Image: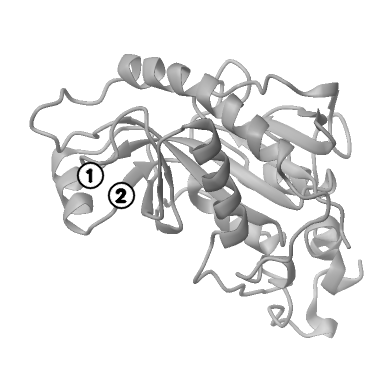
Amino acid sequence: MTKAVLGIIGGSGVYDLPGLDDLREEAIVSPWGTPWGTPSDVLRSGRIGNLPVVFLPRHGRGHALSPSDINYRANIDAMKRAGVTDLISVSACGSFKSEHYPGSFVLVDQFVDRTHRRESSFFGRGCVAHVPMAHPVGPLLQRRIAAAAKEEGVPVALGGTYVCIEGPQFSTYAESLTYKGLGYDVVGMTAMPEAKLAREAEITYATIAMVTDFDCWHPEHDDVDVSAVVQMARQNAATVARLIARIARDFPADHEPCPAGSDRALDGAIMTAVSARDPALLQKLDAVAGRVLAV
């Protein structure tokens, strides 16, 4: 059995993870980053109870990176090299439904990608791969988050669709009404391509969407502004820390095989013939795809 290592990517307002014992900070591969470039920050590794936990602030400490400037490939590669088997993404989001009110959490299970400036795959010219994404969230991991939330008295909704926009601007009123009309639950700027890359790296992935506002569709609420989002995100941060601590304490020591196929997403996914594969790209894929490429 593979030993479980829990990864946490913290979004807006979540720049640290209190409660990590045996804390150490480490750069991955080299001081300047991974084969894909520099991650958002150094990884902070430690333990909660007996479980190894790795934390990375998505925007960097001090929130230096906009959603479009984050090196998602470097972040996921770094997590893979750190041995992460299960990855929880924490993201500040706007809500399109009254029942998802500011301060509540949504455990989304679907994504719609509306980004257009980001590298969304580890693969490409010289090694083409197509992984399945019908069910992007690991159901067992999602249920563990839900169970921990129940134990901690944290309000969560199980299931929902997250539409990821490019940003950094918030939605227009017309966009907000369109997304609401399509039945989406929340809007954010960071889950994509993060979820896609986690699947390519064969890491089980789940998202905790922290609702900070009602976007701009709601007639009884003001337009979204940074001060309101930051204030609610900071309030949510303490709840997130408590929730993560509970998840980690109750987490199994051995990684549970993912029913959504995360663990073996690359089986049969490589299209490029062995003779046509680019050796330079294969070297960069050593961590992400070494299992199937034997790099």
Quadrant of residue 1 within the rendered picture: bottom right
Please say if 35 is above or below 137.
Answer: above
Quadrant of residue 120 within the rendered picture: bottom right
Q: Is mark 1 on a helix, strand or loop?
A: loop
Left or right of 29: which side holds 62? left
Q: Residue 86: which disc?
A: none
Q: Which amino acid does label 1 sit on?
A: Lys
- Residue 167: x %, y % from top left: 37, 37
Q: Can residue 13 be seen in this view?
A: no
Q: Nearer the viewer, residue 220 or 172?
A: 220
- Residue 60: x %, y % from top left: 62, 24
Closer to the chain start, of discs 2 and 1, is 1
- Residue 206: x %, y % from top left: 56, 51
Q: Can residue 245 be seen in this view?
A: yes
> From the image, which quarter does the C terminus lie in?
bottom right
User: According to the image, label 2 marks what residue?
Assistant: 185
Query: For the point 78% across and 57% down, which residue is it?
Result: 255
Residue found at the far left of this picture: 219
Q: Is mark 2 on a helix, strand or loop?
A: loop
Task: Check contact, mark 2 vs mark 1: CB within 8 A.
Answer: yes
User: According to the image, label 1 marks what residue?
Assistant: 97
Please say if 268 is above or below 30.
Answer: below
- Residue 272: x %, y % from top left: 73, 81
Q: Nearer the viewer, residue 110 or 142?
A: 142
Residue found at the far front of this picture: 151
Q: What residue type is labelled 2?
A: Asp
Question: Within 10 Å of the Cα at label 1, are there few (<14), some (14-19), or many (20+) other Cα atoms?
Answer: some
Query: For the point 43% across and 22% down, which residue is it?
Result: 233
Query: For the point 65% across and 39% down, which residue is it?
Result: 247
